[in-house]
Image (cartoon, rainbow, N blue to C red):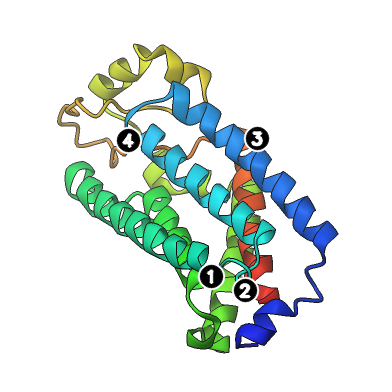
Amino acid sequence: MHGEMAAMDMPLLPMWLRIVWVVALLAVMAVHTGHLVVLSGQHRAWHTGHTVMAAGMALMYLLPRMQHPELYRAGLVLFALVALVQAVITVAFRAREGAVNPLWLLATVDMLAMVYMLLPPTTRPDWLNWVFVAYLACQTVAYGLGAWDRLPVFTSRTPTSVTAGVATTEHAREHEHAVTPLSAEPAPDPTAGPVVGLVAHSSLGVRVTLAVMAASMAYMLAVM
């Protein structure tokens, strides 16, 4: 469904449902804001990205494009820049850590989905809409079930020097992610797998927020 008239007429998104999504996304923002305040390094950057994404989705549900076209144009520029920054971060940590961190890669793809949603409706082909819907639906399930926690890049044994560094970080022990300090240099250990600084050992609360955000994006794309 394309065109500005189609964008106005969204019978599958009545006002009461918009409000439900906005409230849910505000809760997502609150959770990630709390974590970005107390964490540091990659973790703060990762939670910041999700906080911005949740804020963008809440505004999209609350403020229709037809009544606020300038907001959507500004959002397109903002999220394109954020997606670019996250892509650079993904590549930079791939070079530093010796492995692509799926969390950064997925965060970048999710941000590209935000950019896609902010494009003018006439530029979005239907088939690509449904590709993103399918991807985000899979993300909803994967985040909800904690599927990313079991990837080998996160379950590989960490060298002793890094583990010691983790133990000295009090905030990291109290939150959902195990932290590899940005300044730590892993000791050579042929038996250890890749060391990544952002590990997917998420609490249930964080997994739920990520699933809610992915679901909100999938639904928005499906009814556009």
Vertical placement of residue 36 versus 46, above or below: above
Please indicate whether residue 48 sits to the left or right of residue 129 in the image.
left
Q: Which secondary structure lies at badge 3? A: helix
Marks 2 and 4: CB-CB under 8 Å?
no
Residue that badge 1 annotates: 69
Q: Nearer the viewer, mark 3 or mark 1?
A: 1
Which callout, 4 or 3, points at the residue further toward the start of the chain? 4
Q: Nearer the viewer, residue 50 or 190?
A: 50
| Sooner in the amino-acid sequence: mark 3 or mark 1 | 1
What amino acid is labelled 2 in the image? Met
**In x, y percent, where is residue 152?**
41, 47
Report the disc number at residue 47. none
Judging from the image, what secondary structure is the residue with disc 2 in?
Answer: loop
Q: Label 3 amino acid? A: Gly
Q: Amino acid at mark 4?
A: Gly
How many angstroms separate mark 4 from mark 3 (CA)? 21 Å
**Image vertical order of residue 53 relative to residue 43, above or below:** below
Q: Earlier in the sequence, mark 4 or mark 1?
A: 1
Pick whichever of labels 3 and 2 is earlier in the sequence: 2
Asked if residue 208 shows in the view, the reply is no
Q: Residues within 10 Å of mark 1 (few under 14, many from 20)?
A: few
Pointer 4: what residue? 197
Residue highlighted by disc 3:
205
Q: From the viewer's perspective, is residue 70 above or below residue 190? A: below
Q: Position of residue 121 (x, y in %)?
A: 55, 82
* Residue 177 pos. (x, y %): 46, 30
